[in-house]
């Protein structure tokens, strides 16, 4: 990745100290990536407003999130996998699309009804995905049932969504809201927009005929386990007014991030899987689908418990995602649940974390 630096419209946004630290950390990365190959492609199952569907998830390799190049979010290292120089030609993006469709033909019998497209930034940012490429992608998936595209609130606009809606696709915008609490989003995550900006983007999407899928971050840095759980529960309930699906992402430790630096020095522990389960259980009655897919679950750098029960709790979380039945969590027990309860009671923000 080329040396991170803020573009003109990113200057003065977020916290200057966080951005300066993040640029220094990101500059340690000297990897390069092929602009003709997508970053990742996989096939799975997802719960949608219309039921469980086979899903094709795509991470396009673009020039990377412009906010991350300014410094960006404390926990996000995805920009480290972006193409050096900040831009990808239209023809290269079409090559990535061909690679995606080839992968689907090889690993799935037929086509997936649900397509999710990410760029580790904003798919609707035309610096990352130019309008002609966006239109070509919309046409390529016109025969599907639903498509999800990732974007920061700034780039949500009717004319961009129309490329998909005009194909008859049910279209959702996935917004990395992280939390409904502005102070936590600003000071812990270093994300520059306010909750009001999310609300405005949701209104624009709804007016265009699209839906909203909100992504929330479980336990950003500088929060205790109790604070993180409380903020997650309140955030889910608050953004359910604007999003038909809320995806809770437990924070994991990614390279070239501030969270990685904190974790290395013993100043950050990813959330307990018990906290993920508790948040899902406490918001099962929310007016939205609430799901979670803990990346790196069970490992030191992902959401984890004691090591003995991690796989069973993760299985219960995945079961909840598909069935939305909170009773699945009553079927999992472990002695470390008592340790987790103690952490909730005793951990304080000025000397956290209590456990690894």
Image (cartoon, grey):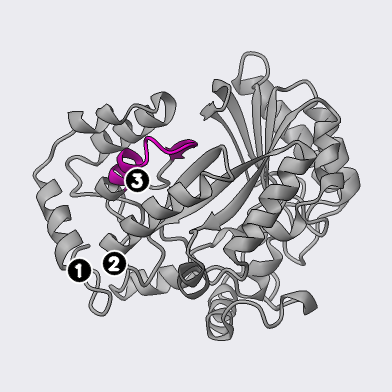
- Circle 2 residues within 10 Å: few <14, some 14–19, many ≥20: many
Give the labeled residue for mark 3. 297
Q: Is 167 inside the magenta-drawn segment?
A: no
Label 3 and label 1: CA atoms lie apart by 22 Å
Q: Earlier in the sequence, mark 3 or mark 2?
A: 2
- Circle 1 residues within 10 Å: few <14, some 14–19, many ≥20: some
Q: Earlier in the sequence, mark 1 or mark 2?
A: 2
Q: Secondary structure at mark 3?
A: loop
Which mark is nearer the camera, 3 or 1? 1
Give the labeled residue for mark 1. 347
Labels 3 & 1 near each other (Cβ < 8 A) = no
Labels 1 & 2 near each other (Cβ < 8 A) = yes
Using residue 244 as the reference point, say whether residue 353 is left or right of it: left
The answer to whether residue 33 shows anywhere in this view is no
Q: Is residue 194 above or below residue 199?
A: below
Using residue 110 as the reference point, say whether residue 265 is left or right of it: left
Magenta stretch, residue numbers: 276-292
Give the labeled residue for mark 2. 224
Using residue 234 as the reference point, say whether residue 104 is left or right of it: right
Residue at the spot x=19%, y=28% of the render? 331
Q: Is 279 inside the magenta-drawn segment?
A: yes
Label 3 and label 2: CA atoms lie apart by 19 Å
Using residue 166 as the reference point, say whether residue 229 is left or right of it: left
Q: Quadrant of the C terminus?
A: bottom left
Q: Earlier in the sequence, mark 3 or mark 1?
A: 3
């Amino acid at each position: 990745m080329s040396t991170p630096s803020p573009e003109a419209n990113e200057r003065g946004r977020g916290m200057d100290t966080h951005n300066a630290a993040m640029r220094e950390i990101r500059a340690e990365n000297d990897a390069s990536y092929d602009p003709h190959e997508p970053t990742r492609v996989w096939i799975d199952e997802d719960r949608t407003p219309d039921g469980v569907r086979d899903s094709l998830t795509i991470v396009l390799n673009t020039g990377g999130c412009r906010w991350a190049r300014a410094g960006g979010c404390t926990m996000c290292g995805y920009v480290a996998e972006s193409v050096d120089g900040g831009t990808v030609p239209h023809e290269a993006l079409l090559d990535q699309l061909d690679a995606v469709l080839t992968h689907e033909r090889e690993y799935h019998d037929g086509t997936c009804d649900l397509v999710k497209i990410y760029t580790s930034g904003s798919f609707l940012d035309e610096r990352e995905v130019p309008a002609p490429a966006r239109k070509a992608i919309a046409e390529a998936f016109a025969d599907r049932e639903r498509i999800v595209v990732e974007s920061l609130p700034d780039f949500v606009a009717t004319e961009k969504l129309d490329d998909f809606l005009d194909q008859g696709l049910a279209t959702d915008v996935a917004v990395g809201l992280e939390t409904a609490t502005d102070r936590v989003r600003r000071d812990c995550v270093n994300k520059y927009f306010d909750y009001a900006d999310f609300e405005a983007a949701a209104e624009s999407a709804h007016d265009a005929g699209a839906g909203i899928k909100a992504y929330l971050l479980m336990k950003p840095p500088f929060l205790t386990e109790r604070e993180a759980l409380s903020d997650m529960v309140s955030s889910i309930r608050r953004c359910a007014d604007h999003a038909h699906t809320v995806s809770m992402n437990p924070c994991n430790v990614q390279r070239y991030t501030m969270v990685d630096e904190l974790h290395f020095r013993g100043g950050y522990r990813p959330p307990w899987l018990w906290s993920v389960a508790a948040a899902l259980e406490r918001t099962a009655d929310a007016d939205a689908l609430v799901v979670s897919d803990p990346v790196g679950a069970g490992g030191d750098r992902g959401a984890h418990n004691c090591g003995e029960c991690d796989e069973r709790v993760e299985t219960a979380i995945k079961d909840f995602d598909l069935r939305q039945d909170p009773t699945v969590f009553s079927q999992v027990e472990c002695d470390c649940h008592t340790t987790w309860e103690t952490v909730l009671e005793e951990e304080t923000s000025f000397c956290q974390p209590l456990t690894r």
